Image (spheres, rainbow, N blue to C red):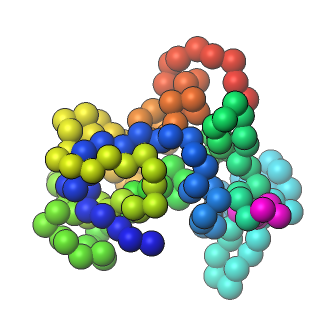
Amino acid sequence: MQFVPWQNISDWNCTACGYCCKLYSVVLNFPEWLRLVKTFGAETTVAGLNRFYIKRADDGACTFLCHFGGSYLCGLQHMKPVACKLWPFKILSEPKYGHASRAQFNYRSRTLFVYADSMCSGLRYGAPTWEFTFSTLREFADIALGMRQAQCKTTSNLSSGRLCGLRWSGFW
């Protein structure tokens, strides 16, 4: 895993490639774990030493990863864990991955440090666009700070259709 400061990223869009759901284990906070257990049963989660995780399928992917029409979609779109909502970004209060000046993001009277996981195929490198800085990144920050639940910019366009006012018939 290599993390890149946000100021090295021109733009980001989810490509619905499914890599995030195949490569990483999803850490759940207690309320997320409880919601999943109540909705889908305890067998959809796994307990670690001090954390809960979404269970992985035999192929290593998240149990809730759905393949549809050449794209991968989240089967938990209506109750997606925060870790999934934030990926590929890490929004921190300290510059954990270096390059503090390039990672610094001043937002709502707070200094945050924002990095992106370079494994994400949806990252475009270069000078940040206005849209990325003032729309996409702010949505990620709002989700990280607990000020927002719904996603519009921070998930695939297919997945976010229903949540952002577009009309299509889908899974959710």
Residue found at the very far top of the displayed protein: 167
Position above or below: 89 against 170 = below
Q: Which residues are magenta?
A: 54-59
Regarding residue 112, the answer to whether it shows in the image is: no
Regarding residue 24, the answer to whether it shows in the image is: yes
Left or right position of 61 against 97: right
User: Residue at 40% of width from left, 57% of height from top?
Assistant: 89
Left or right position of 119 against 128: right
| Quadrant in the picture for residue 100 | bottom left
Residue found at the very far left of the displayed protein: 101
Give x and y (percent) for residue 96: 30, 76
User: Residue at 52% of width from left, 36% of height from top?
Assistant: 156
Magenta stretch: dominant secondary structure: loop
Q: Quadrant of the N terminus?
A: bottom left
User: Residue at 35% of width from left, 68% of height from top?
Assistant: 3
Left or right position of 159 against 107: right
Give x and y (percent) for residue 143: 42, 48
